[in-house]
Image: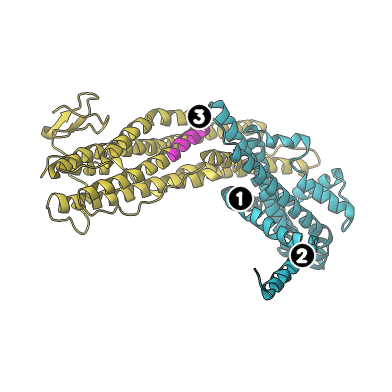
Chain colours: A yellow, B cyan
Amino acid sequence: MMRHFPELEYAIRKRFESDRMMGYIWMIVPILPLLLAIIGAAIFLGFILTAIAAGISGPTPTAPFPTDSMAAILMLGWIGLILVGFIISVFGAVALYYMISRRNNHFRRQRMFTSILLPYLEAKLKEKGRSSNAISALALLNRDSEYEETERSAAVWAVLYIFVSPIVGLYIFHFLTNDLYKHFKRQIDLNRNFEALLKDLEVQFVSPAQYETKRRETILYIILTIITAGLFWIYWFYLQLKEYNEHFKSQWKLEDQLMNTLRTQMEGLPPETPTPALLKAPPAPSPLDLKYCQYCGKAILLDAKFCDLCGKQQPA
Amino acid sequence: MPNSATFAANSNQHSIRVHEIGKGSHMRQIQFIPSVERILRDCFRRNWTQIKAVTAALLSVVFISGFVTLLAFTITPSVISMVNAIIRSERSYIAIPPHSSEALYYFIFSNNSGAYWNPPKMIVWAPFVGLFALGLDLVLNGIVLGAIAVWAGVMYGAMYPIVGLTPHGILEIPAFILQFASIIVWQQVSIKLILTKLGGRNADMQEFKQGLKDTLTLAALSISLFALAAWIETYITPHLLETVRH
């Protein structure tokens, strides 16, 4: 077995940490502010209407409540509104933090996986005395992803969201939507080139149908969110949860199929059926099996060639 | 060289063609209908997201508003008489023409179709800034529609809002939706053009022109629907409401 193969398996194991599936319970984040706004408006309207009704019912206008307690109610209501607004913003910030970090982690893991798979297949080509044009295309695509799929600081954006929620929230959704679409298109190109490369190695492999991430006009989505007083954001939020989850699932399926093909047709190992055992989360590594990245200081496995955090190659 | 039979067939075809062209306006009409249908179908396909989003948002606001109004009426029934007083006082400010009159038709039609063509409301066409005015208008329209439907139901029975709103509403609400969608399309293409120009990139003028065409198509369709809805509201709805009252 070539030394790259266990590294490939390691890159796949990392998906349990990087590709976080977010449940639809997170939909509470866009729905809660709307519900509270409706309840708040109804209470405010009821309060005003009761005051007016009490005022017009008698021969002389009277206030429905003593003036002092009215002032206290209004003040308490105002403080309560600010508090509830802050709590909702914090909820939203947590959701956005997870959304941005899963984007970062998935893109990084993908690069790591391709960076390990490429030299592995290159070595196999050399071993068989063959060549393939797909190698340079794949290297170019991987370099392109390093340049395009830059890290976004999840913490900074989450904190900013607490203070300037609507504008920052819309911008975050704008880049999350566009980045996933570009990543998907690049992924399709990578798959096509991997197929060509494996064909040159006389390996039968057809990548499974990928979940299609559609191109979405984010300007239109921002406009619709503003015009519908935030109602459209509920739908956009749902799309964000769904599309990343579906992309991860479809990516996992592809990786499992690819790994099974490499196991059986390249390494001469038995296939992992019905689904690879890798689908189970691996046990946490012992501290003795760890080393630290020379560039960013992140704890990584002793035999890892690339850092999980910064993606840089580790010296032998 | 063609024989006599072929010549006869050819001349026959020629005469048919000449005859068809001679039909003039009728033929043009036949060609015009499919092209209008094609233009509308393409326009709807391109802007389906906008239409769907506005529909969902408007219906949600109408539903929420209706629910809140019903809740308010149930908790404090004295509010109903207050709303009656407000509606009565509003009627004394606006001179609504008499039922089933031409003046009422023009009043309703110009009020609906010209909603965004009068100077204070033309702000909705201003890129980006207009979005907030348009959003506010959509929410207010939804709130008024939901509240009025519930108020009418409470005052005159459940059949009253159904008979009073459905016949013209079935055209008027889609017309409102198309009107909103047309402004959204305009906002979308104009904001995109401005952002592209600000970013120093080359703007896709073809896309901008297409957006402009779609804006006009949707606006024209909404005006046609408003014309029909106003006719129904003027000449049919009052008779239906009379029937329900008796």
Q: CA distance from mark 3 to mark 2?
A: 70 Å
As rendered, which of B103 and B68 lies closer to the eye?
B103
Q: Is residue A228 magenta?
A: no
Q: Can you name the residue that lies furthest to the bottom here?
A: B5
Question: Viewer-nearest of labels 2 and 1?
Answer: 2
Residues drawn in magenta: A164-178
Q: Which residue is mark 3?
A: A164
Give the number of the disc on residue B18.
2
Vertical relation: A58 (above or below) A304: below
Give the mark nearer the N terminus: 2 vs 1. 2
Give the number of the disc on residue B69.
none
> In this figure, what is the number of numbered marks?
3
Q: Which residue is mark 1?
A: B51
Please identify the quadrant where the N terminus of chain B is shown. bottom right
Locate residue A8, reporting x and y percent: 19, 42
Answer with left or right where residue A149 lies relative to residue B15. left
